[in-house]
């Protein structure tokens, strides 16, 4: 884990914050060049750092560790880093505790994560009712004390009656989870742990004594790394029985009546008062799914007789069940999505009834409660909730405020819904909707803090013309009264993949940026889901260049409108957003003073050779086809770095245990830019040895990384006001 810098009583007088002398720090190691040439459909691709893909090689380990040490030493000597760290911690501690992942059962039991100000990780709690006494169920620090490694709770699912709880934990951000079952009455585990879990909810059966779970195959000696996530299966486990007795219920090795190719993800869903079971087959990262229906009785007899509800051509992305009906959210012939329903006993989409037709609003999610079907839609980026009674009456609910709306987990036997609501300038707040009073009321679980909703922040929504004339939404947040003279430090972020939207959010720690004059901007680029299915497909595979070109257009707008200038502009992208920031700076390095690729996809041509790469071929394409190679090459930042170019300063961050994007992608990119850049600006590789993709990182780790990023930007902006 990256360590905090030595404590200081004030700003150091020995180092000029704006002109840190890099020669005063141990030399940054130079990576040797060992060219490998691949030929794809007649195109030679030279890779000078292929050897870095073997992180078991001692020489590679030594180079990465030396880079990480150099980065720690460099950042720790920035006087502003200590000030940022202290302020970020103060802001984070300003609220007594943070509550998340709330789930309520029909009997009133409530389960949730809570992280008190003094806690480094989230803990899992339970109440018998909203006003009941709080009871600690799972403290991940127990596992840390046993193993010496940080642990996080990745997932939990209580039985329908609340008497048992399945929870999953993993170490050091690896997401390589183990499944545990505990009694909520005795607080003791009742079965031995199950390994090889991908953090996903289990499906409890109505008997509250058994559940379905999804498990990865065993990685055997000699097995290719790319096979890790293939042939996953669904098993049926009964409490008190040995793991060896678990019944294989769904998967490529289980059910001939269901097509489950090796690269797919099979899941089974259940209901608390129903004999129906739903099988879901997910195709890697593809949003569209296959659905089948069977019954608990047939599964118990090993004769499931699955009946198909839909497959990927029907473009269904979500479903919810009430009684004999299944409700489907689909984009087929509806770019903004529509809701249809069909009977479970005899599903037929050809005769399916339209419950909510396509409109200018974009339907994001659906949930079938006991009293009605609820839908979350967005209108011009603002979340709305629609209630549709089971006899077809449509009601637009009045929310407590505008912002981002998400469903919390609620029992389908309960009336109403639970939601979270947040904006660009207000933290999450949790509400319960009562259909009898037609009112939303605060749940009361989340305590309030001083910086939850600063009154001096302003959020502005604009649209920006991109390279092809398309208008791109851009959100801009800053302190009230900010003078637009081009001198403001600005952080522009974006994502643009998988059809996911960059919805409004706010965290107390962001105020550390705003109070120092910082501007925060979010580019809602194509490839995301902000404007529906067509928006997503316009930044997908062959159309992926729109993603980073939209980002570039937003950067140009911020400069032209004098929110900032190239000398004060930083760009950031994480995970698949690494494509966005990596290609933006390789195409227009002159626009940015700083680039921050975080756990980024930076070498897309090689993604398919990684454990998680096969899952991502539906999103990005495959080098097995010429069209796929052309698309992947176009979005490959590593292969677009050119010698002698004045690249911006870079802080490239990654976690060593990342299961989603291999850390060698960041290592190779750092080595290439360090060798190629003519600007003389620092290119730092920040490798956290006790973190992964960011999921499960401790509070300290998160604050450390943010302090490093903020201080690095201010250093490169030559601002000493931090």
Image: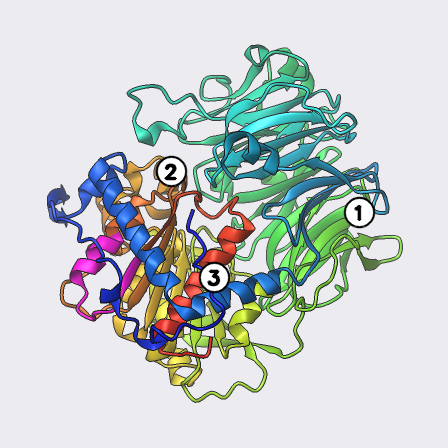
Judging from the image, the colouring scheme is rainbow
Q: Earlier in the sequence, mark 2 or mark 1?
A: 1
Q: Which of marks 2 and 3 is nearer the N terminus?
A: 3
Q: Where is residue 59 in the image (x, y as percent from the top left)?
A: 20, 40
Q: How far apart are marks 3 and 1 (CA)?
A: 65 Å
Determine the secondary structure under disc 1: loop
Q: Where is residue 284 in the image (x, y as percent from the top left)?
A: 43, 38
Does 392 sit above or below residue 207?
Answer: below
Mark 2, other Cα within 10 Å: few <14 / some 14–19 / many ≥20: many
Q: Which of marks 3 and 1 is in front?
A: 3
Magenta stretch containing residue 349, yes or no?
no
What residue does disc 2 label? 612
Determine the secondary structure under disc 3: loop
Q: Where is residue 545 in the image (x, y as percent from the top left)?
A: 31, 61
The residue range painted magenta reads: 669-684
Q: Residue 429 appears in which quarter of the rendering?
A: bottom right
Magenta stretch containing residue 677, yes or no?
yes
What residue does disc 1 label? 391
Q: In this view, does 706 lie to the left or right of 382?
A: left
Q: Distance between the residues labelled 2 and 1?
A: 44 Å
Q: Which mark is residue 7?
A: 3
Q: Nearer the viewer, mark 2 or mark 3?
A: 3
């Amino acid at each position: 884990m990256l360590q905090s810098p030595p404590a200081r009583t004030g700003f150091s007088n020995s180092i000029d914050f704006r002109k840190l002398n890099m020669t005063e720090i141990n030399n940054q190691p130079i990576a040797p060049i060992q060219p490998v040439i691949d030929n794809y459909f007649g195109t030679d691709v030279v890779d000078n750092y292929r050897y870095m893909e073997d992180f078991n090689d001692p020489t590679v380990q030594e180079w990465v560790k030396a880079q990480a040490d150099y980065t720690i030493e460099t950042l720790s000597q920035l006087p502003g880093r200590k000030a940022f760290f202290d302020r970020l911690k103060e802001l984070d501690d300003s609220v007594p505790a943070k509550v998340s992942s709330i789930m309520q059962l029909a009997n009133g039991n409530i389960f949730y994560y809570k992280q008190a100000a003094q806690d480094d990780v989230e803990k899992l709690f339970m109440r018998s009712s909203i006003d009941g006494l709080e009871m600690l169920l799972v403290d991940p620090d127990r596992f840390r004390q046993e193993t010496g490694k940080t642990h996080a709770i990745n997932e939990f699912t209580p039985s329908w009656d609340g008497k048992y709880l399945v929870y999953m934990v993993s170490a050091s951000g690896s997401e390589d989870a183990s499944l545990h079952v505990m009694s909520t009455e005795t607080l003791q585990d009742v079965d031995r742990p199950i390994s090889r879990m991908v953090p996903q909810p289990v499906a409890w059966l109505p008997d509250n004594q058994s559940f379905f779970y999804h498990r990865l195959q065993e990685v055997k000696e000699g097995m290719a790394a790319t096979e890790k996530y293939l042939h996953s299966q669904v098993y049926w486990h009964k409490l008190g029985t040995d793991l060896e007795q678990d019944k294989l219920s769904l998967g490529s090795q289980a059910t001939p009546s269901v097509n489950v190719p090796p690269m797919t993800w099979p899941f089974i869903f259940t209901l608390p008062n129903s004999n129906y079971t739903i099988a879901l087959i997910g195709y890697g990262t593809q949003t569209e799914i296959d659905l089948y229906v069977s019954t608990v009785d047939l599964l118990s007899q090993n004769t499931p007789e699955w009946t198909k509800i839909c497959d990927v051509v029907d473009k269904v992305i979500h479903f919810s069940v009430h009684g004999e009906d299944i409700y489907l959210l689909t984009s087929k012939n509806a770019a903004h999505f529509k809701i249809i329903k069909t009977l479970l006993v005899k599903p037929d989409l050809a005769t399916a009834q339209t419950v909510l037709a396509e409109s200018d609003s974009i339907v994001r999610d659906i949930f079938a409660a006991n009293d009605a079907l609820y839908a979350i839609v967005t209108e011009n980026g603002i979340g709305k909730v629609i209630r549709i009674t089971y006899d077809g009456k449509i009601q637009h609910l009045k929310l407590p405020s505008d912002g981002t709306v998400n469903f919390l987990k609620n029992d389908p036997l309960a009336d109403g819904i639970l939601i979270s609501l947040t904006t660009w300038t207000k933290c999450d707040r949790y509400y319960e909707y009562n259909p009898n009073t037609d009112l939303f009321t605060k749940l009361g679980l989340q305590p309030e803090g001083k910086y939850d909703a600063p009154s001096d922040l302003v959020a502005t929504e604009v649209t920006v013309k991109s390279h092809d004339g398309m208008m791109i939404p851009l959100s801009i947040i800053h302190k009230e009264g900010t003078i637009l003279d081009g001198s403001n430090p600005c952080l522009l972020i974006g994502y643009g993949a998988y059809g996911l939207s960059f919805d409004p959010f706010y965290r107390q720690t962001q105020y550390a940026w705003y109070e120092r004059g910082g501007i925060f901007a979010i580019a809602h680029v194509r490839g995301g889901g902000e404007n529906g299915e067509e928006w997503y497909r316009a930044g997908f595979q062959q159309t992926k260049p729109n993603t980073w070109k939209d980002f570039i257009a937003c950067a140009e707008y911020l400069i032209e409108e004098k929110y900032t200038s190239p000398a004060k502009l930083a760009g950031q992208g994480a995970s698949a957003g690494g494509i966005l920031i990596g290609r933006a700076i390789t195409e227009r390095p002159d626009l940015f003073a700083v680039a921050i690729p975080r756990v980024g996809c930076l070498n897309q041509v090689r993604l398919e050779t990684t454990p998680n790469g096969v899952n991502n071929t539906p999103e990005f394409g495959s080098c097995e086809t010429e069209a796929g190679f052309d698309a992947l090459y176009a979005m490959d930042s590593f292969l677009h770095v050119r010698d002698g170019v004045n690249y911006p300063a870079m802080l490239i961050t990654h976690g060593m245990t990342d299961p989603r994007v291999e850390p060698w992608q960041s290592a190779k990119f750092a080595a290439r830019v360090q060798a190629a850049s003519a600007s003389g600006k620092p290119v730092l590789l920040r490798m956290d040895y006790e973190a992964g993709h960011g999921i499960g990182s401790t509070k300290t780790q998160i604050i450390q990384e943010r302090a490093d990023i903020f201080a690095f930007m201010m250093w490169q902006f030559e601002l000493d006001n931090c």
